[in-house]
């Protein structure tokens, strides 16, 4: 039986991209819901996993995007229920906000372009992160940051500028500050839409050849990660050992 994954898309400009290909290749069936357009489930009943994608808005832009409160509530419920959950960039920030963390504009400004993030000690024993290399290729493109992790979160990856790059809440909920799902066309559109963010990247960071090399490296690293996420959702990969209890849910 196929593994059913609910994909929440907060912004039309941030589709599931390559991540969707990897998930379906690993045997998942995706149900993509565009926030503000499609009816959003109140919980993940009937699904094996949840993926929340990124967006150009902030995690608490409720006045302009009232559906964000519903997404945070959904992430809170899936985390509490032990559903396999993955938040990417804004999705990771929403997961942090939904479980007691703090999200705010990055005090050192935006982070943009191809980047390496480094595994933390806890990542070597994590079911999704253990097999990743010490340094992982990712794409950064964000203004806001996770300033403080939820109290019961486990830090899994960092950069020198902003340390909270990847984390786990409980045993099956994961947040990424960076992007792994992009294609060259998606990135080109972001650069055109947000030149202020793109301007902080290194010279040539968004050249076609650079993006092609970056996406090839990301594919090599993160395609197996996506397969492990499907296995986690399907129940064939054991979740992380986490003896801590009393997870605060907002």
Image (tube, rainbow, N blue to C red):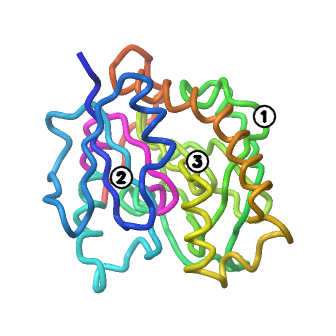
Q: Quadrant of residue 239?
A: top left
* Image position of 215 (left or right of 48): right
- In the rendered image, the quadrant that contains the N terminus is top left
Q: Identify the element where label 2 is drawn.
A: loop
Which residue, given by chain and number where applicable, does mark 2 sit on? 248
| Residue 14, position as x, y percentages in the image | 45, 62
| Residue 89, position as x, y percentages in the image | 52, 59
* C-alpha span from label 1 to label 3: 16 Å
Looking at marks 3 and 2 on the same chain, the residue that comes earlier in the sequence is marked by 3
- Where does the magenta region start and end? 77-93
* C-alpha span from label 2 to label 1: 30 Å
Which residue, given by chain and number where applicable, does mark 1 sit on? 134
What's the residue at 56%, 73% (across, down)?
144
| Residue 60, position as x, y percentages in the image | 38, 76
Residue nearer the viewer, 68 or 205: 205
Looking at marks 2 and 1 on the same chain, the residue that comes earlier in the sequence is marked by 1
Looking at marks 1 and 3 on the same chain, the residue that comes earlier in the sequence is marked by 1
Which residue, given by chain and number where applicable, does mark 3 sit on? 180
């Amino acid at each position: 039986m196929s593994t059913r994954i609910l994909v929440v898309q907060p912004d039309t400009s941030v589709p599931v991209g390559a991540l969707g290909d990897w998930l379906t290749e690993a045997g998942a069936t995706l149900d993509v819901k565009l926030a503000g357009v499609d009816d959003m489930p109140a919980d993940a009943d009937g699904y094996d996993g949840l993926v929340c994608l990124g967006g150009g808005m902030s995690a608490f832009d409720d006045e302009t995007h009232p559906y964000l409160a519903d997404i945070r509530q959904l992430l809170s419920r899936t985390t509490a229920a032990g559903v396999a959950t993955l938040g990417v960039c804004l999705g990771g920030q929403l997961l942090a906000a939904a479980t007691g963390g703090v999200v705010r504009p990055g005090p050192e400004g935006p982070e943009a372009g191809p980047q390496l993030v480094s595994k933390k000690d806890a990542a070597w024993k994590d079911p999704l992160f253990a097999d990743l290399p010490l340094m992982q290729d990712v794409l950064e493109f964000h203004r806001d940051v996770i300033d403080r992790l939820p109290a019961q979160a486990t830090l899994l990856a960092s950069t020198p500028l902003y340390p909270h790059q990847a984390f786990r809440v409980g045993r099956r909920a994961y947040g990424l500050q960076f992007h792994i799902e992009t294609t060259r066309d998606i990135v080109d559109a972001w650069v055109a839409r947000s030149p202020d963010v793109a301007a902080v990247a290194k010279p040539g960071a968004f050249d076609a050849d650079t993006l092609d090399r970056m996406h090839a490296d990301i594919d090599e690293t993160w395609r197996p990660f996506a397969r492990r996420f499907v296995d986690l959702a399907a129940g064939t990969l054991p979740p992380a050992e986490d003896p801590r209890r009393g997870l605060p849910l907002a």
